[in-house]
Image (tube, helix red, strand yellow):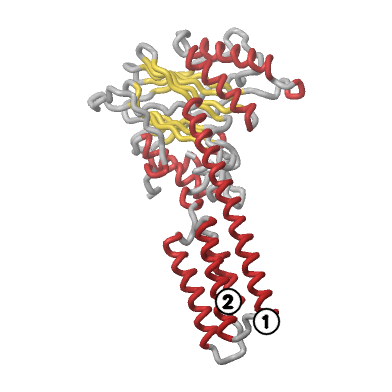
């Protein structure tokens, strides 16, 4: 979803809804007109009709807004005719002012609707780009259950510099999660390069350190061709590479400057594996033996929670960091998709619906031996309507 799911989906909807606001506006026009006609005092209510077109513009398009504006002008003329002041200078000025204001509101609706259509096109392109670059992880790979979540910090964006991917080898599953330094289009380009390199190299190297070295060479070649001179040495990618054998209750990891994941046990225990990190990818450091392999027990029912720093560095209005480990400990027994759903809602509630940086999360759970394994690889992307409440 969407940096945003950095905002709740219903915040972008008009409020109140049009089926409530339109009758209220028409009732308001009728009430003002009737009160002005039957009033025996010198209080003039006609100028209040200016509220009608301004109010209905919140939920309706230019045609309905224009119709309401014309109705308000007609009601103003009726009030003037009833009082015998239709030809007076004051009433004529009120009619002209109301007409001009209604036209301006209609013009505003036209501009707003055009911008909304353009925004919808941008969103569709961004969503397509996300699915091309960040393929939705399948719900199952071998003996594993998986779920992924991406929250982009940029308004209306679907993707940024965070990345993840998974690949099946003969008897294991390999996963990568990473974070490109920087933002904007350059970060997306580097993320695309790292993902493409991983998807190809994951099947060509027998160990994770060899895979990390291959990714380092790919990123360095890319930066040599496209990195701006003024940013030399400042562009890199942190990455965490994982390998989960099908028949061995362990998980192997190679860290390239990326935060260590959380290991969630069924008994609510949460630990952080002790990894030996190597420098991030793209720094030109590819000496032999630079990358190490760490092995951690990973049995049936265990869940590994991978994340980028956008999740652990998210702050609330008071500047307090999101207590990622503490909150994740509440849902250790949940399936991956449900776990990310809880974290998703809780993270947005902590930050007020807006993140300061992109955040990507992956939950990987080893299923018990007796659990049925799905034969297909149907993607199961996390959608707003799939999210369970955080209680």
User: Which residue is at the front of the view, 53 or 249?
Assistant: 53
Query: Measuring 59% from the left and 38% from the top, which residue is drawn there?
Result: 357
Left-right relation of 257 to 246: right
Of callouts 1 and 2, the N-terminal one = 2
Whole-percent x, y for residue 154 in the image:
59, 39
Quadrant hosting residue 157: top right
**At numbered mark 1, what does the secondary structure look like: helix, strand or loop?**
loop
User: Which residue is at the front of the view, 281 or 30?
Assistant: 30
Residue lying farthest to the front in this orientation: 87
Question: Tag 2: Cα neighbours inside 10 Å, few (<14), some, or many (≥20)?
Answer: many
**At numbered mark 2, what does the secondary structure look like: helix, strand or loop?**
helix
Left-right relation of 364 to 121: left
Whole-percent x, y for residue 12 in the image:
51, 51
Vertical comparison of 243 with 357: above or below: above
Vertical comparison of 356 with 208: above or below: below
Query: Measuring 57% from the left and 71% from the top, which residue is drawn there?
Result: 73
Question: Tag 1: Cα neighbours inside 10 Å, few (<14), some, or many (≥20)?
Answer: few
Vertical comparison of 140 with 76: above or below: above
User: Which residue is at the front of the view, 115 or 155?
Assistant: 115
Query: Measuring 33% from the left and 20% from the top, which residue is drawn there?
Result: 142
User: Which residue is at the front of the view, 45 or 152?
Assistant: 45
Whole-percent x, y for residue 252 in the image:
44, 19
Mark 1 to mark 2 CA distance (whole Å)? 11 Å
Quadrant hosting residue 49: bottom right
Determine which residue is flagged by label 2. 77
Determine which residue is flagged by label 1. 88
Whole-percent x, y for residue 192 in the image:
55, 22
């Amino acid at each position: 979803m969407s940096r945003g799911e950095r905002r709740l989906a219903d915040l972008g909807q008009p409020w109140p809804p049009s089926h409530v606001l339109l009758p209220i506006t028409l009732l308001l026009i009728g009430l003002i007109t009737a009160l002005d006609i039957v009033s025996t005092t010198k209080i003039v209510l006609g100028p209040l009709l200016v509220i009608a077109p301004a109010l209905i513009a919140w939920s309706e398009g230019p045609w309905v807004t224009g119709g309401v504006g014309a109705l308000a002008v007609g009601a103003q003329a009726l009030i003037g005719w009833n009082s015998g002041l239709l030809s007076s200078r004051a009433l004529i000025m009120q009619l002209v002012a109301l007409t001009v204001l209604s036209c301006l509101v209609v013009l505003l609706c036209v501009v707003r609707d055009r911008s909304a259509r353009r925004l919808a096109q941008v969103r569709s392109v961004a969503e397509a780009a996300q699915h091309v670059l960040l393929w939705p992880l399948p719900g199952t790979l071998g003996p594993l259950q998986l779920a992924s979540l991406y929250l982009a910090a940029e308004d209306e964006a679907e993707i940024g510099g965070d990345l993840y991917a998974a690949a099946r080898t003969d008897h294991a599953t390999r996963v990568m999660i990473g974070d490109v330094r920087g933002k904007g289009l350059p970060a997306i380009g580097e993320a695309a390069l790292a993902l493409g390199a991983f998807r190809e190299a994951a099947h060509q190297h027998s160990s994770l350190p060899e895979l990390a070295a291959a990714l380092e060479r790919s990123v360095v070649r890319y930066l040599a061709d496209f990195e701006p001179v003024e940013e030399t040495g400042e562009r890199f990618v942190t990455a965490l590479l994982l390998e989960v054998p099908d028949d061995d209750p362990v998980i192997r990891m190679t860290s390239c400057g990326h935060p260590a994941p959380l290991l969630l046990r069924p008994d609510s225990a949460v630990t952080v594996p002790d990894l030996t990190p190597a420098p991030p990818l793209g720094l030109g450091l590819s000496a032999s033996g630079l990358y190490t392999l760490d092995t951690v027990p990973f049995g049936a029912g265990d869940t590994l929670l991978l994340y980028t720093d956008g999740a652990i560095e998210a702050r609330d209005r008071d500047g307090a960091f999101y207590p990622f480990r503490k909150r994740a400990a509440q849902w250790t027994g949940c399936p991956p998709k449900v776990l990310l759903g809880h974290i998703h809602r809780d993270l947005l509630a902590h930050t007020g619906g807006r993140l300061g940086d992109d955040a990507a999360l992956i939950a990987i759970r080893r299923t018990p031996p007796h659990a049925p394994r799905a034969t297909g690889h149907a993607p199961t992307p996390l959608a707003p309507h799939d999210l369970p409440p955080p209680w």
